[in-house]
Image: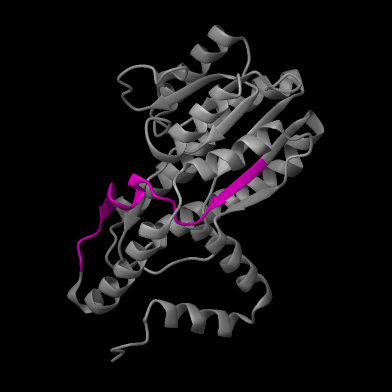
Amino acid sequence: MTTGLVTTALVTGASTGIGRAIAERLAKDGLVVFGTARAPSGDLGAVRMRAMDVCSDQSVRTCVQGVLKEAGHIDVLVNNAGFLSVGAIEEATLDSARAQMETNFFGAVRVLHAVIPSMRERSSGRIVNMTSLAGIVPLPFWGFYNASKAALESLTETLRYELMPFGIRVSAVEPGAIKTLLYTVDVKAAALPAYAPWRKRFERRMKEFETAAPGPEVVAEAVAALVHSGKPRPRTTVTKEAVLFTTLKRWTPAGMFESQLRKGFKLDVDRP
């Protein structure tokens, strides 16, 4: 059941995967939930789908204004829209790097700019930014995805300081490997043969993580707990592996941690 005045939620990137699971979970709890996608084909049960392209200022403004007109207010914002771009830093073009940041980071910023004023006027609101374990423990061949999530991590912490005086609580949710389309619907840079041996081993290891990963429902549960909490945590790490990796990075000497990560992905095998 809902608590307090938390009655309306807006979830970006809600057509599939983690975003859809979050939207459906909040709707199950009794919230009026608006989900967004670039081209929604219709509502998802109780989730009211609306068109939003987070890379377009006008699209974001139009969607948020429409939701505010229909619902009167937005109590919860879940910034989830994003995608995975794969490739070594050297392989990525500047255009692909900009596209990754434009969606995963600036897309979230656009939605924040559109939603925060109404929350601030009401002195109430919950914001959950979906970051990633990769924003804390960067992985090879995911460089610009890592960077986009690390930027969102830092932005989230800043927002907590700035918005708390207005009664707006901000949190980050940091999923590890989750069984979603993220690993199959991605953008791959043109591959350079020089990186081939390490890329193949990394992709094989990530496939193993994905196969053993839980479904997006575990992330939805974590988001729901934050939404209904009187004192939502600054960050919530989801999956046992994500908790382990973040703990090890926090308490292990940097050189030792890097050595173990390289060993896990066999990055030192076949070194020139």
User: Residue at image x 78%, y 36%?
Assistant: 164
Q: Residue furthest bottom?
A: 272
User: Residue at image x 78%, y 29%?
Assistant: 166
Figure disc tally: 0
The answer to which of 229 and 165 lies nearer the viewer is 229
User: Residue at image x 55%, y 33%?
Assistant: 78
The answer to which of 271 and 208 lies nearer the viewer is 208
Up-down: is 17 above or below 135? above
Percent from the top left, x then y, of residue 58? 42, 22
Percent from the top left, x then y, of residue 102? 41, 43
Point out the stretch of residues depicted in magenta. 171-191
User: Residue at image x 29%, y 61%?
Assistant: 92
Q: How is the structure coloured here?
A: one colour
The C terminus - image quarter? bottom left
The answer to which of 252 and 25 lies nearer the viewer is 25
- Which quadrant of the view contains residue 221? top right
Up-down: is 45 above or below 105? above
Magenta region includes residue 227: no
Magenta region includes residue 183: yes
- Which quadrant of the view contains residue 122? top right
Percent from the top left, x then y, of residue 59? 41, 23
Percent from the top left, x then y, of residue 77? 58, 29
The N terminus - image quarter? top right
Up-down: is 262 above or below 140? below
